[in-house]
Amino acid sequence: MNDANRKEANEYVLKTAKEHDVKFIKFWFTDILGILKSFSITVEELEGALEEGMGFDGSSIEGFARIDESDMVALPDPDTFQLLPWRPREHRAVARMFCDILRPGGEPFEGDPRYVLKKNLKRAADLGYTFYVGPELEYFYFKDSKGTEPLDAGGYFDLTPLDVATDMRKETVLILEEMGIGVEYSHHEVAPSQHEIDMRYTDALTMADNVMTYRLVVKEVAVKNGVHATFMPKPVFGQNGNGMHVHQSLFKGEKNAFFDSNEKYCLSDVAKGYIAGLLKHAPEITSICNQWVNSYKRLVPGYEAPVYQSWARRNRADLVRVPEYKPGRERATRIEFRSPDPACNPYLTFSVMLAAGLEGIEKGYELPEPVEQNIYEMTEAEREKRSIGTLPSNLLLATLLTEKSELVRKALGEHVFSAFIQNKKIEWDQYRPQVHRYELDKYLPVL
């Protein structure tokens, strides 16, 4: 944003805050693990904050791997100013803005996930591309945060009798739209008490901000209704987990760079290279897209979660799915990457997906033939014959693959790359010595 545009945007924020009698403005940013952080200022501080930012302790961005206190500056992005509709109406209004994190001298802080995504989007822009994404975030409603008692026994697209879950989903959609976030679909998902709201695709930076907002709105509405919402990847054994299938495409101006009517499946060479890049680099970006110990309880065969490096048009078990082209819908040509879960850091996840896709385009990776048959029913020898690899099966294996990846190191930058690896090793070391219910049930009676 140039100085003139920023000045105009700042003036709009000040004017809007005055018109709506805003008293508090929440400054939002995320840590390396994608946890939303916030502090508030009063409207009296707003003009100065828009110009110079507000100081805070930057060690809060490091996740588990906290460093010594370090001064940072949160500079609000005026384009993200929104009133918070769930706040009580009888009090003065509250608004929020996402922030870019700067060092005290004004240069960007390389540990800021939003800055990481901006860097990767600039790389795409330098090649002439705009990166669009449309993620589908699944979540569960439970009676409370202490257990997994569902609110309903519905299934995929079920129209359950009007109940608290239906009303909460509707209320969530209305709040998102009031905050300028377009919604395409909302429906019941496969597992009991599992739901999904799909946001309308937009540019990746806006969408990463939208994902952070979406997760908070879902939880706020649940709390208001006396229940608990969770994006935990696999909260219930034996049921489908929560995924975040990410539809994505590259545009050059108004033209979808993934579409070519003269090519097989209407996929351009750019699209084929992009898919090939995602497939090849999928194992090394898995710890970013699936960053929790629990993520790997979802990435197992049999629950619609992809574990094999394959692509297809119709088969929803593959890692990459290409929705079939419909005449007149060239702009909708896209690919769907199905392994990420909704508990990821969206800024980092969109960054590594884009980096893998661009690598495939720039280096001319060859796209293998699609796999339309059920991969889960293939023998290991059959999969090996077709060169179908697998995703890592636990967080440690995934982290070690990422640690060796020059692609991820380059995409995240040295600060975030090193801090992320350290965070994941800490998490694994905390998880490894735990004694779980399965072990007690299986071994205590007989050993």
Image: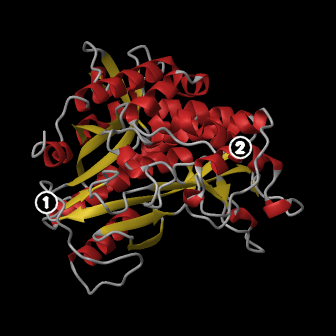
Residue located farthest toward the front when viewing the structure as drawn: 446
Q: Quadrant of the N terminus?
A: top right
Disc number lying in front (2 or 1): 2
Q: Which mark is residue 207?
A: none
Residue at the bottom extreme, as displayed:
161
Mark 1, secondary structure of its residue: loop
Q: Is residue 258 above or below residue 42?
A: below
Q: Residues within 10 Å of mark 2 (few under 14, many from 20)?
A: many
Picture coordinates of residue 26 (x, y %)? 27, 42
Which amino acid type corresponds to the residue marked 2 in the rendered image? Ala
For the rendered model, the colour scheme is secondary structure
Residue at screen point 52% across, 44% down? 205
Q: Which mark is residue 276?
A: 2
Residue shown at the point (37%, 45%) measured from the top left: 295
- Asked where in the image residue 25 lies, by quadrant, the reply is top left
* Quadrant of the rendered image containing residue 127: top right
Q: Position of residue 139 (x, y in %)?
A: 33, 60
- Distance of label 2 from label 1 (alpha carbons): 42 Å
Marker disc for residue 144: 1
Specify the amino acid type for callout 1. Answer: Asp
Q: Which quadrant of the figure has residue 408? A: top right
